[in-house]
Amino acid sequence: MKLKLALAATIAATFLVVSGCGSSDDTSSADTQQDKDDITALVADIDKASREKDALASCGLMQPSGVTEVFNTQSQCVRETKKILELNSADQPRLKVENIEVDGDTATVTLENDIGGAPITVVKEGGKWYVPLSSDAAPGLTGTTDE
């Protein structure tokens, strides 16, 4: 249970830190450009969900297989994420998508704002991009507990 709360807290914190404004990369592949457009939209959706403290929308942006693995059900994800979102201030800095590097079904998104940049990892599942919940797919996004 504590691991689930740690994961929920980490993901919720990610939602509170991320916002999107576009990508600065040029691309020669239409598929890669579509992925970058989709990832930019995901980042914007994450920003909106966190600012509105919308746990249902936040859980909908999380990797479906990870939601099942970590929370068992979507409703449990919503309950736990809602608690975390309510604890955090809505006055989070807006970030700009500085760069997106797509590598198959994973991508690294470099974000920038006035307090410094932050890279995040996103994953593609079922043809759609999501915030990952497993530590293998999302280095730096998931937390662990000693208890």
Image (tube, grey):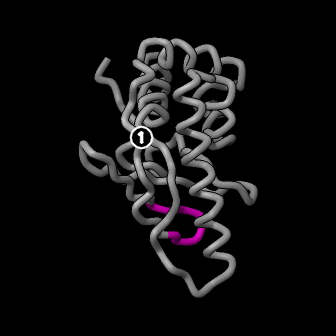
Q: Residue at x 41, y 40 (%)?
A: 94
- In the image, taking residue 61 as reference, residue 144 lies left or right, namely left
In percent of width and height, residue 123 lies at 57, 55
Quarter of the image with the C terminus is: top left
Residue at the outermost right position: 126
Q: Residue at x 63, y 43 (%)?
A: 63
In percent of width and height, residue 39 lies at 59, 57
Q: Which residues are magenta?
A: 102-108
Q: In front: 112, or 123?
A: 112
Q: Residue at x 57, y 16 (%)?
A: 82
- In the image, taking residue 77 as reference, residue 136 lies left or right, namely left
Vertical position of residue 139 compared to residue 143: above or below? below
Q: Residue at x 40, y 25 (%)?
A: 91
SS under mark 1: loop
Q: Is residue 2 magenta?
A: no
Residue at the outermost left position: 115
Which residue was labeled with disc 1?
Answer: 94
Type of amino acid under label 1: Arg
Q: Is residue 104 magenta?
A: yes
Vertical position of residue 14 compared to residue 77: above or below? below
